[in-house]
Image (cartoon, rainbow, N blue to C red):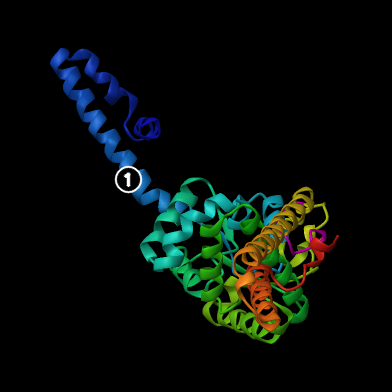
């Protein structure tokens, strides 16, 4: 209402607002009521008509995870933009659940309005890297500039992508965030990428990466798109956004990979390995207890030694399969950040 009153003071001459002093009490009440109604209409006009056109996303990041989105977010903030990047607040990613599960345009419209109203003018990273979501966002903000972060070498991107996804998996697994990991899997399925890629998935992932970049190039007009290569510096980005080049170094030194700060990585690795060791201990204890129970109750009734040996082998194999059940939850091989 304060904005509406200030707007009203600019539109209506002060003498016209003061003239009610010469009126009676009824005239003053009528004048104030009319001014209040006009103020409400002006506030409505300002919020519904002026806000969507004056407040919008200026920059949309279209690169995949591992392509340099984290350094790009730091660079945009250094240029004065307020950048929203989903993975920086895992708890906030639950807001994208309806969009990822139901692919609802209304959900994207609502979330975009909330972010714009909160003051964000740049947005990147998942789930905005899904091409369908990107196209819907461009329909809502047709003047936004799109930045596609790319690697000169697709194999280097795959290595960074492996580290990023492994860190997300370990985070969800260590914190019992099953619902968040389900969103990660749905998002990766939309990108035709595995949630936890192994070395054997390299060809598939690189093909999906190249296809995604080609679809972005085809969907966005050339003058509205910037392909930002790793280690290219401030010059192409500042020229694209029509801003001056900062005196500080470009934050490419913040290498892509884990989305968690260094102080959290060691703790996260320790927590995961401790939980995995606990599972192994529980499975081993279960196998030993079951073997002792069967030895005291069932084995004396078995007359032949081969039958006893066969039963013990079956019991041991069951314990190993139970242990393997938990082992399969971890990706094959630790990423480099977990091997420190």
Which x, y percent locates residue 302? 62, 76
Q: Residue at 47% of width from left, 74% of height from top?
A: 132
Please tell me whether residue 214 is drawn above or below residue 237 in the rendered image: below
Viewer-proximal residue among 281 and 25: 281
Q: Which residues are magenta?
A: 253-261
Is residue 256 located in the magenta-colored stretch of the structure?
A: yes
Prevailing secondary structure of the magenta residues: loop
Q: Residue 149 falls in which quadrant of the image?
A: bottom right
The single residue placed furthest to the left in the displayed view is 26
Q: Residue at 38% of width from left, 65% of height from top?
A: 105
Please tell me whether residue 116 is drawn above or below residue 312 in the rendered image: above
What residue does disc 1 label? 45
Is residue 202 rendered to the left or right of residue 22? right
Please tell me whether residue 3 is drawn above or below residue 116 in the rendered image: above
Can residue 110 be spotted in the picture?
yes
Q: Residue 184 falls in which quadrant of the image?
A: bottom right
């Amino acid at each position: 209402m304060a904005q509406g009153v200030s707007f009203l003071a600019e539109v209506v001459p002060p003498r016209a607002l003061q003239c009610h002093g010469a009126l009676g009490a009824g005239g003053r009440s009528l004048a104030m009521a009319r001014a209040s109604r006009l103020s409400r209409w002006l506030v409505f006009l300002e919020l519904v008509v002026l806000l969507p056109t004056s407040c919008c996303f200026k920059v949309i990041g279209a690169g995949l995870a591992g392509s340099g989105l984290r350094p790009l977010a730091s660079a945009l903030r250094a240029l004065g933009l307020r950048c929203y990047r989903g993975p920086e607040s895992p708890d906030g990613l639950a807001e994208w659940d309806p969009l990822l599960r139901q692919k609802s345009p209304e959900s994207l419209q609502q979330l975009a309005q909330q972010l714009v109203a909160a003051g964000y003018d740049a947005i990147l990273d998942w789930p905005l890297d899904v091409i369908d979501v990107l196209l819907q966002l461009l329909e809502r903000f047709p003047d936004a500039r799109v930045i596609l972060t790319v690697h000169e070498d697709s194999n280097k991107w795959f290595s960074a992508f492996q580290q990023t996804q492994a860190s997300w998996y370990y985070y969800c697994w260590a914190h019992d965030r099953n619902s968040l990991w389900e969103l990660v899997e749905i998002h990766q399925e939309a990108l035709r990428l595995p949630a936890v890629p192994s070395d054997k998935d390299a060809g598939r992932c690189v093909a999906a990466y190249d296809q995604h970049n080609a679809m972005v190039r085809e969907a966005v007009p050339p003058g509205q798109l910037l392909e930002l290569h790793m280690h290219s510096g401030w010059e192409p980005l500042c020229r694209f956004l029509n801003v001056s080049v900062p005196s500080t170094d470009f934050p490419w030194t913040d290498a892509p990979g884990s989305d968690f700060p260094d102080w959290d990585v060691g703790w996260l690795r320790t927590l995961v390995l401790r939980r995995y060791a606990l599972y192994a201990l529980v499975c081993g204890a279960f196998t030993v207890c079951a073997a002792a129970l069967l030895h005291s109750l069932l084995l004396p009734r078995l007359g032949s030694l081969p039958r006893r040996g066969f039963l013990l082998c079956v019991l041991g194999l069951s314990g190993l399969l139970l242990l393997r059940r938990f082992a399969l939850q971890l990706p094959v091989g630790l990423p480099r950040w977990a091997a420190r």
